[in-house]
Amino acid sequence: MKITFFLTPKDKVVYLNATSTIRQAMEKMKYHRYTAIPLIDDAGKYAGTLTEGDLLWALTDKGNINSKNLEHINLQMINKHINNKVVHIDAEIEDLLVLTMNQNFVPVIDDRNIFIGIIRRREIIGYFAQQYYYSNNIASQIKQITPAIAN
């Protein structure tokens, strides 16, 4: 099944420009209660994922940080500890299962490598859970019919 059915389009995704500051990132992540957020460059391409851990390590590494300093530290200066893999819009949902074991979301790009949205882990797990229960329901019905056929 194509992933377009599960896509949350860019206009519905909370993201940051890669040139945003730590303060902007912290405010947006706190407001939305996100632990990770996609970064987009000025050309609209996916530029990585910023996590709470990245911010924590950045603050720890920078030493004496106050709220005014947070306005001057660009996200491009922060080491990203997670490298979320992206998928092309033509990918199949089955291609995403392994990716979501380590990612909250999977960034989706188009033919020009432009960020067009994300697929959340929740939707992927929901799809596979539905497939699992559907296949098990059929299997249990077959088991009920099989003894009657054998007699």
Image (cartoon, rainbow, N blue to C red):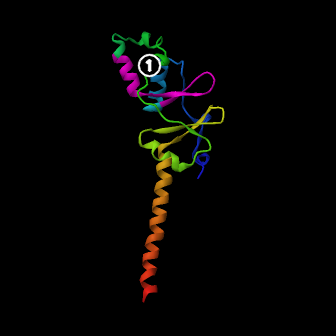
Looking at the picture, how far across and down is residue 77, in whole percent? 46, 16
Looking at the picture, how far across and down is residue 106, in whole percent? 51, 39
Q: Quadrant of the C terminus?
A: bottom left
Magenta-drawn segment: 37-60
Does residue 12 appear left or right of residue 96 in this picture? right
Marks counted in the figure total 1
| Residue labelled with disc 1 | 78
Does residue 30 appear left or right of residue 41 in this picture? left
Looking at the picture, how far across and down is residue 71, in whole percent? 47, 13
Q: Secondary structure at mark 1?
A: loop
Which residue appears at 62% of the width and 26% of the height? 44
Which residue appears at 41% of the width and 39% of the height? 102
- Residue kind at label 1, given as amino acid type: Ile
Q: Residue furthest bottom?
A: 151
Which residue appears at 44% of the width and 23% of the height? 26
Which residue appears at 50% of the width and 28% of the height? 48
Reply above or below: 20 against 128.
above
